Image (cartoon, grey):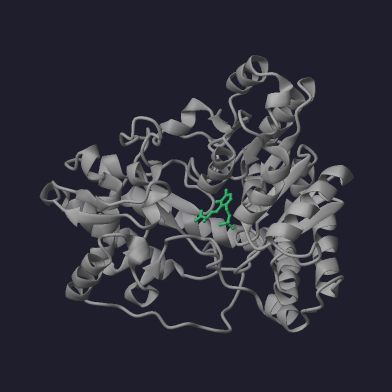
Amino acid sequence: MKIPYAESFKIKMVEPIRRSTHEEREKWIKEAKYNLFGLRSDQVFIDLLTDSGSGAMSDRQWAAIMLGDESYAGSSSYFNMKKAIKAILGFDYFLPTHQGRAAENVLFSVLVKPENIVPGNSHFDTTKGHIEFRKARAVDCTIDEANNTQLEHPFKGNIDLDKLETVLRTYPKEQIPFICITVTCNTSGGQPVSMQNLKEVNTLAKKYDIPVLFDSARFAENAYFIKKREKGYEDKTIKEIVREMFQYADMMTMSSKKDAIVNIGGFIACRNEQLFKEAATFNIMFEGYITYGGMSGRDMNALAVGLDEGTEFDYLDTRIRQVAYLASKLDEYGIAYQRPAGGHAIFVDALKVLRNVSREEFPAQTLGIELYLESGIRSVEIGTILADRDPVTRENRYPQLELLRLAIPRRTYTNSHMDVIAASLKNVYERQDKITRGFRIIYEAPIMRHFTVELERL
Ligand code: F0G
């Protein structure tokens, strides 16, 4: 008999989670104004709101926490982090920040000016936010295949080279501070970018003399997909693939709460000393002195270990197989999601699951609420509420896809939890004929409305 797969870790510490009743959940979600961000964590049974900072650290990381050096300047923890970044990613210069968006804030303070254009593959919300905040514009050059959830494509995070070149030809190079490649691409479904695409984008960038920035939150998951799906990489280690990937980047921003498997932290890394020096000034202003930048020594220590563990094949194999396991259950039940399954999450295609809810009534949000009511699972809408209103017309923007993201925290849940998630979605899917109405907004903030939006059932 073929020996089945099993996780590459055993569990040393546990945290109880509590089931609730349907009546309790009805009450709680109503009190939260039907905003899943408004729930208390103890009102949630399985929390798939995000994979950011919500994972479990290893015994090695906890040991490193105890050895954290809390000196204000020049701590050994800073040098541990520096060494890990050089060894794994190959960058000589780096600045710690308290998380990914802080890295964007510091670096973009140097690089992004009004009227600038930043092409990339479906920029993440905070990245786009930090670009637009500086009166610049993010241009999405992702391949069209990414917009068809049912189409199988190994690298749906890829940049369309024609779209990119059109941007590079249209605007003078002084107006394009960098090209931003997000690996893996969160917004298009945790989808990877191929090595070939990274290389081709880099060649194009050189031709037009424009630097390349990697938004690297899930770079290790990207490397895993390259190993699994791209010819010529089967026998390379994840660390070898990562080193090769970053040869095509001039600089990077990192949310360490993802692939460095820590609860808080981020950084900027680059090869250019002048850029480092300019960014260092903003780091001191916004984050902290250059050898801690908003992080404690213990957290920098855990991050250094996390970078090493996060780029080990066995860890990634366990993680991504778990996401794929959930996807296989959804296949069994006929539930549509962005195919193939992403690295950190499943993005359910809400328009194909709740066919009777009109787009004006927020089908992905409705699905998220139904899933919560079914069994206490918290997910997040990646649809019309997140897409916000057009800044000029103030009309709702309807994105091509209306998705519900089920983000899987690292090393946190077991496949039994995946079974509960899949069964709960199946139950909602089976009663979709009874779900004909969605929600109406009763309060919304002028920007980033999804965090605090208040809704009313129709
Ligand atoms: N870039 C990407 C691709 C991200 O997914 C995130 C965060 C950030 C940058 C910002 O990093 O949160 O550390 O400030 N994504 C989280 C998520 C919030 O749920 O996907 P941060």
Residue 135 visible in the shown view: yes
**Residue 136 in picture, x, y percent from top left:** 58, 33
**Foreground residue among 302 and 414:** 302
- The answer to which quarter of the image holds residue 25 is bottom left
Quarter of the view holding residue 417: bottom left
Q: Position of residue 56 (x, y in %)?
A: 57, 72
Q: Position of residue 345 (x, y in %)?
A: 47, 53
- Residue at 39% across, 56% down: 451
* 406 relative to 392, above or below: below
Q: Is residue 296 above or below residue 426?
A: below
Q: Is residue 4 left or right of residue 209?
A: left
Q: Residue at x 39, y 79 (%)?
A: 17
Looking at the picture, how far across and down is residue 98, in whole percent?
Answer: 65, 63
**What residue is rendered at 76% in x and 33% in y?**
211
Q: Is residue 446 left or right of residue 68?
A: left
233 or 119, nearer to the observer: 119
Q: Is residue 219 visible?
A: no
Report the number of numbered marks.
0
> Which residue is outermost to the left?
434
Query: Is 24 situated above or below 281?
Result: below
Q: Is residue 456 left or right of residue 207?
A: left
Left/right of residue 432 with respect to residue 410 in the rendered view:
left
